[in-house]
Image (cartoon, grey):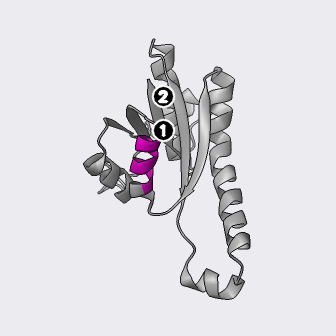
Amino acid sequence: MKILLPVDGSELSLWAVRHAVELVRSGLQAHFVLANVQEPPTLYEVVTVHDAEVLEGVAEGAGRHALEGAEALLRAAGLPFDSVIASGDPAHTLIELAETHACQAIVMGARGIGALRAGLFGSVSRAVLDDSPVPVTIVKPPEPDAAAEALDEPAVD
């Protein structure tokens, strides 16, 4: 099975990668496609920089940096993966990447906002969930005590 793992470099997206690693440890055979989507440059950036190659280089560098943690997790687990950096609207681009790379599923992090909306998804997660032609698993981060235990770190209050 080929699974798309969208990552943005945040700890929330790394929880989705950890979840995918656990799926493999539980017996799933999978190859992963790590994906980072950089939004197109703003008009201000285009006007001030004047050089499309510089802007592309900055986006490529930011994408590589965002993928580093996820790549390290998959390497440490000895799992096969490809990495891709794309540009565009994140939700639509992720769906296109899943189709282009013939992924049969997407596993991605959720983004809770504050205590009142902690159960709600981020806008990208929601859009992918709504529009994806393949199954999507949204991984919520564990509670702080469980997260610290999973990472073998003391909980911080």
Q: Which of marks 1 and 2 is in front?
A: 1
Residue 34: x %, y % from top left: 56, 40
The amino acid on which the numbered mark 2 sits, given as a three-letter code, is: Ala
What is the distance, in whole Å, between disc 1 and disc 2 at their CAs?
Answer: 17 Å
Quarter location, residue 132: top left
- For mark 1, does the 10 Å Cα neighbourhood hold few (<14), some (14 to 19), or many (20 or more) residues? some
- Residue occupying the point 57% across, 43% down: 156
Local secondary structure at mark 2: helix
In the rendering, which numbered label is found on residue 101?
A: 1
In the rendering, which numbered label is found on residue 79?
A: none
Q: Is residue 47 above or below residue 141?
A: below
The N terminus - image quarter: top left
Residues at discs 1 and 2 in contact (Cβ within 8 Å): no
In the rendering, which numbered label is found on residue 20?
A: 2
* Residue 25 appears anywhere in the view: yes
- Residue placed most toward the observer, 78 or 139: 78
